[in-house]
Amino acid sequence: MAATGMKVALHRQVSGGSMKHAGELRRQASMESPRTGRATNRFLFGRQSSMDPNRRRGRSQSPVRAAAAEELTVPDNLDATMQLLFFACHGDAAGVEGLLAGGVDVNSINLDGRTALHVAACEGHKDVVRVLLNWKANIDARDRWGSTAVADARCYGQTEVYEILKAHGAKIPRNKRTPMMVSAPGDVPEYELNPAELQFRRGQEVPTGMYVIAKWNGTKVSVKILDRESCSDHEAINSFRNELTILEKVRHPNVVQFVGAVTQNIPMMIVSELHEETDLSSCIQKKGRLHGQKVLKYALDIARGMTYLHQCKPDPIIHCDLKPKNIFLDSGGQLKITGFGVTRVSKVAPDKVKLVDHEAIVDGFSYHTAPELYRNEAFDSSVDAFSFGFILYEMVEGLIQSKSPEDSSHVIRFEGMRPSLRNKLKGYPPDFKALIEECWSPQAMARPTFSEIIIRLDKIYAHCAKHGTWKDSLKIWSVSIRRFNRSMKSRIHTEP
């Protein structure tokens, strides 16, 4: 019995000797050994458990790398369990087979309760997974956080491994742990909301990844849901974190306000203020075009909100999807920008970024989208100025009419064509037309910043107010209405 206990303990420990290839193994903070109660060094192979709250956020690559030209060698002083995990991490199916044939337990675990099957599933090594399954590996073994090999494979997007494990009967564990679960109650973020305080309409279908209306302590709010299935999706979690990180730090009258989030329970949620009035697209569609004074007021609201986002530190918040549907009108007649923080970008230069997943979102682009985004090039905050040019046009001329959105998008991004500014700009000074044309310029360097846009819009607004442009426009409009009414009456009287 004592011998059996010793064997299990040996499988759970790591020798304390020197390590070759120190770059291939990562040492984390020490933790207590389950056998002795003393601190033991904890060596990690590759990607970590999908449910480990301390794993590096957004991690996409394993730190364990072996150059193709180098011969794979096992570091010194690794016990049999750690050798098995090492080979599983490197995808060495022959090495794994050799150890198992030599008597190593296929279900040996490390200090975190992780098996070779966990490690191989995280790294996507199909051949190793098949070898382990042939040796009757416990397919539903759980690590110390409750994760299984199939849950890890799904989290890291290892589709083929996931399908292999599912075909062998693996089941994703259902538990209440979330990918953002903290280790101690004191680490719960300040924005955390009690999910019991959120009430949804009875019988309402709540689609994941979409904002729906709910009530929080009696106040109507907008809630984005990430359900249990999406909580196992690595990309969905990264997008959720990215949006949450951005939303929690913005505060501006022309930006939709963040209320809080649920990150310690499933489903996870992001809660923001709700504006049920209307979005700018519906407003333009209903009225056809907006009155000049309202156009400039709304334009300044948008420009002020975008200036704030672009001046956020340490990096500007680039919207990438600025369009009338992502701009809401509140009950006080003020515009608020929403939809930012959804598009994930990676920094490629001090002032340039690129889309993280261009192929996944390119089909959702519209004619408001700058051409460099379509081409998947590095870009800066000027892409939002491009979108703003089209928003100005639509407030003055009405929504762009085309046989299909794809047609208008094609001619704008590939043929460089722009809608014609007809006669409806007659009441505006020349700089207004120039501003639209500069904003939607195909050249990013030619587009003004939103700080510059505010200065120019203020001057245009003052010019129109001083010269009574809006009053004259209203007089012309009212005279036209009276003439139309008189003509209709005369027709009625002359008809037999």
Image (cartoon, grey):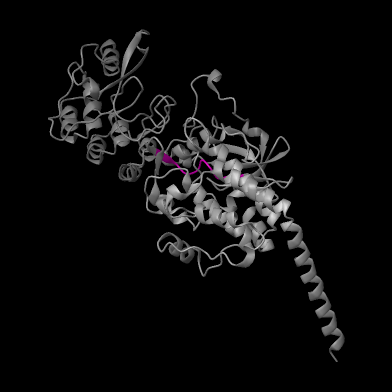
Dividing the picture into quadrants, the one containing residue 295 is: bottom right
Residue 260 seen: yes
Q: Residue at x 66, y 64 (%)?
A: 288
Answer with left or right where residue 94 lies relative to residue 141: left
The question of residue 30 being in magenta is answered with no
Residue 398 seen: no
Residue 28 lies, with reference to residue 172, above or below; the image says above
Q: Which residues are magenta?
A: 337-346
Q: Dividing the image into 4 quarters, which one contains the N terminus?
A: top left
Q: Residue 162: x and y, percent?
A: 34, 42
Answer with left or right where residue 19 lies relative to residue 437: left
- In the image, 227 versus 193, the foreground residue is 193
Dividing the picture into quadrants, the one containing residue 147 is: top left
- In the image, 262 versus 389, the foreground residue is 389
Q: Residue at x 66, y 61 (%)?
A: 289
The question of residue 343 being in magenta is answered with yes
